[in-house]
Image (cartoon, grey):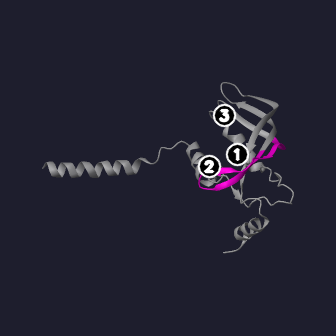
């Protein structure tokens, strides 16, 4: 009799769990999407060596508006619907290069000898902030705001020494199609 009661209890428990649905907050999906969709954002790229006799590379790859807005939205306050909600209108992004510097070669684990190229960008986000509430009485406040966001786009350049033949061979090795 106890075996039938145990089986019946397990079946009823499984049915109860299956019929309840998923109780997940709406913002969990956004966090999961950011975590798995943009997984290369925090990885440092490794580029070919800097060749002697050529001009030093410059930081020309500014952060995209999407990257800046993703960092901007991480700081956003989550409101309570109809009680306190924030909206941003007329967004303009201005990007300025602050630091463009190449360090001397040193050893990096899993990479070897390389030079760290610092590219620091200061991005200004100009927007109109709208705070809206429908309870206890309808109201909204609109005011222009500016937020400054710093983004680092550092990368590594392999270092093979001052020999031009070695530099050329390494460049050919890194750029050939496989």
Residue extent of the magenta highlight: 90-119
Task: Give SS at disc 2.
Answer: helix
Q: Compared to 110, does 100 lie above or below?
A: above
One can see residue 26 in this view: no
Residue 95 horizontal side relative to residue 137, left or right: right
Residue at 72 percent of width and 67 percent of height: 170
Q: Circles 1 and 2: CB distance less than 8 Å? A: yes
Disc number for residue 77: 3
Q: Which residue is mark 1?
A: 70
67 inside magenta stretch: no
Q: Circles 3 and 2: CB distance less than 8 Å? A: no
Percent of width and height locating residue 19: 40, 50
Q: Nearer the viewer, residue 36 or 89?
A: 36
Instruction: Decide which of tag 1 and tag 2 comes sooner along the chain.
Output: 2
Residue 170 horizontal side relative to residue 16, left or right: right
Q: Which mark is in front, 3 or 1?
A: 1
Q: Please identify the residue farthest to the top as the structure is shown.
A: 136
Percent of width and height locating residue 17: 37, 48
Q: Which residue is mark 2?
A: 34
Percent of width and height locating residue 100: 81, 46
């Amino acid at each position: 009799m106890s075996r039938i009661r145990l089986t019946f209890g397990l079946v009823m428990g499984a049915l109860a769990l299956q019929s309840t649905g998923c109780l997940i907050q709406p913002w969990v999906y956004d966090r999961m999407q950011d975590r798995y969709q943009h997984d290369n954002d925090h990885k440092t790229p490794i580029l070919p060596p800097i060749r002697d006799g050529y001009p030093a590379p410059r930081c020309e790859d500014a952060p995209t508006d999407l990257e800046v807005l993703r960092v901007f939205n991480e700081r956003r306050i989550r409101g309570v619907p109809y009680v306190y909600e924030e909206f941003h209108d007329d967004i303009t992004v201005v990007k300025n290069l602050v630091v463009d510097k190449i360090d001397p070669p040193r050893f990096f684990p899993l990479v070897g000898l390389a030079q760290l190229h610092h590219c620091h960008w200061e991005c200004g986000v100009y927007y109109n902030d709208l705070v809206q509430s429908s309870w206890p009485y309808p109201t909204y406040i609109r005011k222009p705001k500016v937020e400054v966001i710093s983004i680092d786009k550092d990368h590594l350049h392999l270092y093979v020494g001052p020999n031009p033949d070695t530099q050329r061979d390494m460049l050919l090795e890194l750029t050939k199609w496989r």
